[in-house]
Amino acid sequence: MDSAEHTQLLRRVRLALQQADYPAAVASLEKAVAAASAAGDTSSAGRHLGNLALIYHQRLQQPDVALRHFEQALAIARADGDRLTEDGILGNMGNILRELGRYDEAMSHLNQALFIAQEIGDVRGRGIWLSNLGLVYDDLHRFSEAIEVHKEAVAVARLLRDQRGLAGRLGNLGNSYQTAGQHTEALKCFHEAAALYREMGEKEAAALRLGIIGNIYSELGRSAPSEFEARICFDLALDVYQDTLALARELGDLAAEAELMSGLGNVYGNMGDYTRAVEHFTASYHLFAQLGLHDRLPHLQRNIDLAVAYRDSRPSTSTG
């Protein structure tokens, strides 16, 4: 196959991807692999195999097929001594293996990718593989190791001034801290991530992180050692939930609004303000019903009934 035919095949691939015609893209790439192999152009064959793997993984959701293509591409990259391509293939394979729950293999591939990234000076790749390795440790509930790896990934994003990557990695680090019970550190991460997303104009992502912050303050209020400390935490939770609610309404996100109304109801109930607790639980109930999310209704109805009972009889410090 001459260069004109090869160029035409790759053009077909691009057009097929633009039209979301993934079987057509796969067919053209397979022809490109065969042609490159027949011509002895192993480097091109490896690149095409890698692209095939990405389509099978990201577009067709066939991770096992993707892995087979990556394995072939990896063999070619190693034979050619192409360390940069080997680095990328190993990292992508690690991601897929993690998704498949093959954690030992995922760690092995990601650590190999990290070694090569360090060797060849691939700073951006190193940050990505560190972040994904941290997620493997999270999946395995090895949170102290996850925290250390996520911190390294955050440091790389800061070095590269990659604001979007930094926001995402701060979220991962915050999740690890939160699951490990290190709430103060988790709050720092989520606050910075929310601020970054706001700066980038990504309001939905900012609202998600703010909602998590509100949940943490609410949880800290329930477990606070004194009424004074509990009140501080609940006040902070109310402020954050209200801020997040404004964003959710701006975005027209009724599901998020319903969740936030429920969270506000819980905070007011724990503060002993049962009238407001009933108002917010009821608003949440109607929103979930409107959205057809009926599985949420029984729990909300119990909270409404409990808050009404407390309101009409005696004060209390907890609801639902």
Image (cartoon, grey):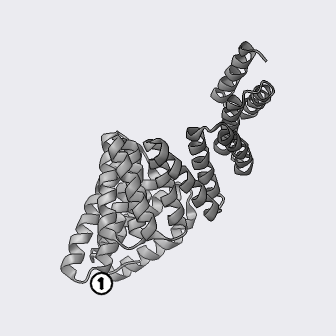
> Where does the image place residue 109, in percent across and percent down from the top left?
60, 55
Residue with the mark numbered 1: 316
- Asked if residue 62 can be seen in this view, the reply is yes
Name the amino acid type tagged 1: Ser
Q: Nearer the viewer, residue 217 or 70?
A: 70
Q: Is residue 160 above or below residue 37?
A: below
Place of residue 256 in the rendered image (x, y in percent of width and height, measured from the top left): 43, 55
Residue 276 percent across, percent down from the top left? 30, 68
Give 247 or 24, whichever is nearer the viewer: 24
Residue at 48%, 42% (x, y): give it. 120
Whether 192 is drawn above or below 46: the answer is below
Q: Is residue 76 above or below residue 229?
A: above
Q: Quadrant of the C terminus?
A: bottom left
Residue at (41%, 45%) from the top-left corner? 165
Left or right of 118, for residue 84: right
Residue at image position (43%, 75%) is 303
Name the foreground residue: 12 vs 84.
Answer: 84
Q: Quadrant of residue 106?
A: bottom right
